[in-house]
Structures are given as structure tokens and as C-alpha cells.
Amino acid sequence: MHRALGHADGAAAVRACRVRLARIIEPSDTAGLVLLAALGPEVLWRSIEELSAPTATLQSVLTKAARELLPTARVPDLHTRFAAWRSRLPVPEAGLDARHAEQLGAWTVVPEDPDWPSSLADLGLQQPIVMWGRGDRARLADLRRSVAVVGSRNASAYGAAVTRGIARELTAAGWCVVSGGAYGIDAVAHTAALQTGPEPGATAAVLACGVDRFYPAANAELLGRICERGLVLSEVPLGCAPTRYRFLQRNRIIAALTGATVVTEAAWRSGALNTARHAAALSREVAAVPGDVLVGGSAGCHRLIRDDHAVLVSNGGEVLELVEPLGNEATVELRDAAQRAVRRPHDALDPVLLRVFDALPLHGDADPTQVCRVSGLSPSEVLTGLATLRERGLAVDSLLGWRRVGSQHGRTERGHTGAQR
Amino acid sequence: MHRALGHADGAAAVRACRVRLARIIEPSDTAGLVLLAALGPEVLWRSIEELSAPTATLQSVLTKAARELLPTARVPDLHTRFAAWRSRLPVPEAGLDARHAEQLGAWTVVPEDPDWPSSLADLGLQQPIVMWGRGDRARLADLRRSVAVVGSRNASAYGAAVTRGIARELTAAGWCVVSGGAYGIDAVAHTAALQTGPEPGATAAVLACGVDRFYPAANAELLGRICERGLVLSEVPLGCAPTRYRFLQRNRIIAALTGATVVTEAAWRSGALNTARHAAALSREVAAVPGDVLVGGSAGCHRLIRDDHAVLVSNGGEVLELVEPLGNEATVELRDAAQRAVRRPHDALDPVLLRVFDALPLHGDADPTQVCRVSGLSPSEVLTGLATLRERGLAVDSLLGWRRVGSQHGRTERGHTGAQR
């Protein structure tokens, strides 16, 4: 550590120090992260390892950097933090950790690496110190076009169906589905993404424990398949268990990695809402799928839409509109076609033409005077209107008078034919 | 008509002229409404009745008034309109109309009446010329605290259940339910309002035909009950049939009469969306109830929430929050209680305390050094944290060490007990 380092060695040393620091500094530990930003991983690691207590210099570095990086926050007490970090020493030998990772096919990615997901930088100081990963590392590039699909662990059949549809539409459009690897919605989203898309497997599970621990155990088989075809990621060191605190911290990574977070089903209390709020705080798009208001399974989604201004989405196409508002022509075309399909012949009529059309009898014929009286329009308006309707194939005239054409729909909303007065 | 009139006669004459004008001027006929505003009902009626064509003076009155009232609109061609109005002459004798109304127990209310619903003034020029009503006229005062509950004619069981619940909650809180008297959601809303509330019957049906024509026929029994206990209203003269144009015009009255419009169930195309847009244009509150995205029955509600920024509501309490945001303490209390009910003992813990709590084993005891190591907190943070947890009844200490108390919940989201590292 103290010898002069070449460039390649330097990168390896930075990585080794970050791995060690991640073992003693929990996510969002302000003092640790401020010092990391100010000193870099190597100097910070050496200071913690070698000093039994923080020096005055170290305290002044922290004070100065904290004032700059977090001007409104209280400067953390370095003595307390230092004691906490050192209570976790010694950490496993870097070589031992690396061998353990190698056996698993796991790797680490650090901010200094060219393939570090750049969107994590939006976390600022809260950016992970290092991330462990399993799966094809080249898949990290998939995260540039990714959407978080999250929700309740106890998903309903409805939530599962909605999630499956959205995950499939996203992967089919070339987007990577990011979720938390948990039961329920997370598992459905990953499973659907493993099955669909131009390159099936565009899915990443971000865990709250080490990537060597498949939690929950019942999802081990699924997580194994994600390792093979997608990505399993975590900022938590190998061997570490998921704690409630780590679940909450993990959610910020899911939110930051992705362009949008979609909550497909969540009850009033759900960790998915926490992910959605992280996404909103990071100015990511936040969307939620509504559901039955009488059951409560979607109450969290409704809360997000109602109170937090999440966008209501009903399908994957509407999610795609959020992340590729301009490029998503296929979706817009589909939607327009769907709208055209339900158009009725009189839909395009202006109010005057509609009144002329409505004044024509369904059966039998009417002369223009009758049409004037029923519609309340003037003779000239009626004559122009009738001619226009004939041109559009909506009316015909004969020696007997005028009648409407080509509409099974009656004059009124229910096909009622009562003439005025 | 040409004799000098006393005050009481004057009021009666104004009413008679408005009734006649409503027979020849359709809702939203700009020229007619501008002249009505400029000349008053008596002069306008006399002009139309007596002149075979508009005079230059009349045209200049229209031009001047239109420029003032509708500065951006094209001045309507009075000759065309005049011809249209006169094509509907002669109108029924005022006395005949009045006798017909009397037989039905119907009455007219005009803007000059003290009980004219003042909220209709927000329609400006589009305010109805006159309204016909059936039922206890004193109920017009109920409209001051009213909410429109509207939706699809082909309602699902879900839409009906949601509507019933909302209409009941509104009437129970002393609010009048306004709807359109149609099949489906309208009928469910009226029916529920007839059955509940401090004064059952706080409901008004606003029709698109004359109040003597119960349309649709299958709702005749319901409309009869509304006449007996609530109100049936229409701007359309007695005997007139509902036309599509009148349905659309009717919706503006429902929107204007009420403080909020709630769409409880509506497919992608639904007249209820038109009512909601009128309400939004009048700066009324607009709300919609979400539903299943896989079926399509609520697609119109989702569209309102997504594209038109309607407020998502799940129950009557949330509707009441819109119309009485300050006075609705009962609802807020209920909501808070519901939230408290699902609180878990550790919910109120700050992040440090949560980490100490999470680091305590579920079974067996831990000494503070272990807690330091597992939590990544300093000894002083751990000791303070443990003391606080003990104070709150969440931890106990003994000679053996510390353990957690009173939570069936494990360390992690699923009760996983794996120790760190």
C-alpha cells in the first residue's frame, strides 16, 4: 500500500480500498462519504486503518469538505464515526475477498471504471462506494436504457398480470427491467424480462444483501437464472445479510440506475413507495398502475398518483412514453389506431352539422322546413348542412325528402327516436 | 304585452318571455344569448315576434354587445339566426305551457328569482335562459352543497359498488348528489342518495329533455321517486326530446351546479368525460375513481387522471376533502386512525435507532460490542440507542446482554435472521 504504484496497480489499489471501505462504512454514512470525496479511497482507508483516533488535520479536512458538499448539514462528529469504523476492523484480506468473488463469478465495479453506471452519479455523495455484480458484466451497458418495475411482495393475480405485461412490453422495446429480486411483483418482473425481448435477459436484480446470498431463499432459482442471463447487483459486501436499513438504501440505487420507476401494485404501506420517492427526489419519472379501490392492494399506487403526482399508467406503452417521449412512434401510432377504430361516422361533425344530422329522422324522410324546426337552425344553415352530410355519405335526398345514412346510432345517446315536440 | 306592467306582472312577464325564448333559442346560441344579455327577455322576445327581419338597430346592438361580451369571437350573422328563431314560431301560448306545468307539479325558475342557483352564473353567457323543475322547489337550496356523481351508462358491478359508496358518503355528510338520470352510474348515484343522508332525497337529476318526459323510459320509476323526494331539472322546454346536442349542453349545467364532478366509472369514450371537462373549464374540482387497467371499463377515468389532471379518489371521504378541505375533520381523523392501526413499534425510529434495533438478535442476547459491529455504529451511538430502545419498551438488558422486545417482526422485511458477515 505504501510503495509507489504504477497505473494498473493504482486502479487495483483503488478498487481494493473501496472494497475494504464498503465493509466498514454503511451506505449514507455522511462523515465517511464526505472524507471519501475529499481524500479518495486510498488515503481514507490508510487513515482509518492506521490511526487509532482522528487527527486534527483529518477533522479539519472533514469540516471544510462537509461545509462545501453539505452546506446546510451539521458537521458529523468524526470521533464517533471513527470509533464505529474501527470497531469493524479487521476486514477480510482483499485477496481473500477477491478469491471468494472469483469462485462465484462475481466482480466489482467502481466509479473509476469506464463501465460504472453513470446514472449513479446523480446520487452525489450517496453514490455507492463500490458495486458487486454477477452475470455478464457487458450487460451494465443495458442499464442506460432501463426502467424500475417494483411493487408488493404479496402480489395479487391482477398485479402479477399487469406487471408481466409491462415488463414484456419494456423488454420487447429494448429496455432493461430493474427490480429488487424479492417475492411477488419483483419476481414477476424479472421472470417476464428473462423470457422476452430482442435479447432475453435484459433484467437486473439489485439486492440488499451480498450477491453471494440469494435472499429470499425461495427466489434462489430465479436469482440463479438472472445471474446466468441478466445481472445481479449489490453495494453490500459479499456475505452480508439484508437489514431493513439496507433495504431502504438499496431502493435509492434502483431509483438512480433507471430512467423511470413504475410501481405496478403496492398496498398503502410498501417498500416500493420508498423507491418511488427516491426516484422523484432524483427527478426520475415516477409512474403507478391503478387498480380496484375496494380491495386495497393498489392503495399505495393510488397514494402515489394522488399525493405524489406519479403518472398513472395502464400499460407498457404508457411507460415507454415517459422514457422515450419522442422516439416512441410505434406506441403513438397504436394508440391513434385504437382511437380511430372506435370512431363513429358522426364523430367529426361540427356542432351545426351534428344538429342537422340529429334532426334527420331515423326512418322515413324529412323536408328541410322540418329539419329547421327540429334543429333550431336557419334554412340556409340547414340546406348547407344537408349538402355537406350528403357529400360525406351521411344523408341522401330523394323526391320524398332527406334521410340519414350509414349510422346504426339513433338521434340520442340510446337511439331514442322521439321527434321534438 | 304592450300594456304598462306593475312589478309583480313584470316578474311574471319576464318569466313568460324567458319560457318563450327557450322554445326558439337552443342552448349556447351566441347571437340569441348576447341579445338577451343586451336587451333583456321582454325586448328580445317582442323583437323576434314582431319583426320579420332584424333592423339595423338590432344588428348594431348585437355587434356592440358581442364585441364587449365575446371580444375574440366572430360577430354572428343576425339574419341567419333571426330566420332560425322565427322558423320555430308560433310557440305554445304561455298560459297553455303554464297549465301543462301545473298539472305535472312542475315550475320554472329564472335568473331573476331569488332561488335561482347562483352557481349557474359561472356559465356567463351560457347560463340557461330558464330552468324547469319538479319536486320540492325548496330543495334548490341543497344545490349550494352539491357534488356531481357521473359515469358510464353500462356500469359494471365494480362501478356500481364504488358509486353507491361515494353517493352514500356524500349524502350522509349532508351533500346533494347531482347526476343525469341515465342508466348505470347515474341511476345508482340517484338511488343511493334517495336512501341515505340526514334528509334522504338530497339528489337532483338534470335531464336533456323536458321534465315531463322521463327518459330513458326504463328509469321512469326512479325519476318519479326523484320528483317526489329530490329534484328533476332541465333547461329544455316541456315536451322536448333529448338530442345529442342537448346531452352535451346538459352536461355544462351538471358541472356548473356542483362544487365538484366525480367520474366513478367511464370507458375511454363516455359522456361523463364531457361533464368533467366542463367542470374543469369552470374551475370546479374534478375527480375520478380508478379501476382495473386490464378491462377498460375505467379507461376514461384513467384518461382524466393521466391527461387532464383529475384528482384520483378512492372513496367518498376523498371527495369530501375536495369540497370541504378544511371542515372535513372526521375524514382526516379516520384516515389517521387507519394509519396508526397499521403502525409497527419500530416505525417511529430514526435511522440510527433502527440500525441498533435491527442489530439486536431475535433470539438470545448480544453485548454492545456485537451491536456496534453488526450495525456499523460507534460504541457511544449504540449505548445511547440501546438506552432509548429500553425506554420505549423495544429492548431489555440483563446480565447476559441485550435483546429486542415486543416485535414479531424480524430484522429484515421477511423476518430473516441472518447475522451480518
Image (cartoon, coloured by chain):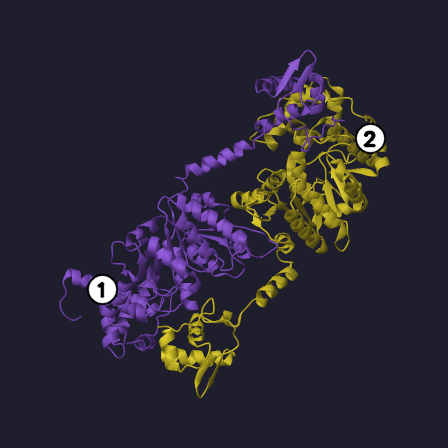
Chain colours: A yellow, B purple
> Which chain hosts label 1?
B
Quarter of the view holding residue B85: bottom left
Q: Can residue B323 be seen here?
A: no
Amino acid found under the numbered disc labelled 2:
Asp
Which labelled disc corresponds to residue A97? 2
Relative to residue B71, is residue B169 drawn left or right?
Answer: right
Query: Relative to A344, does residue A92 appear above or below in the rendering?
Result: above
- Residue A162's spot in the image, x, y percent? 65, 50
Q: Nearer the viewer, mark 1 or mark 2?
A: 1
Q: Name the residue furthest bottom.
A: A399
Relative to residue A167, is residue A10 drawn left or right?
Answer: right
Query: The N terminus of chain B is located in which quarter?
Result: bottom left
Q: Name the residue furthest front.
A: B221
> Closer to the camera, A94 or A50?
A94
Element carrying mark 1? helix
- Residue B317's spot in the image, x, y percent? 46, 43
Element carrying mark 2? helix
- Residue A416's spot in the image, x, y percent? 44, 70
Relative to residue A366, is residue A228 drawn left or right?
Answer: right
Q: Name the residue furthest top.
A: B399
Q: Can residue A410 be seen here?
A: yes
Q: Mark 1 points at which residue?
A: B14
Q: Residues within 10 Å of mark 1 (few under 14, many from 20)?
A: some
> Closer to the camera, B337 or A324?
B337
Amino acid found under the numbered disc labelled 1:
Val
Q: What is the C-alpha distance between the residues marked 1 and 2?
A: 94 Å
- Residue A398's spot in the image, x, y percent? 46, 87
| Contact flag, marks 1 and 2 (Cβ < 8 Å) | no
Query: The C terminus of chain B is located in which quarter?
Result: top right
Quarter of the view holding residue A52: top right
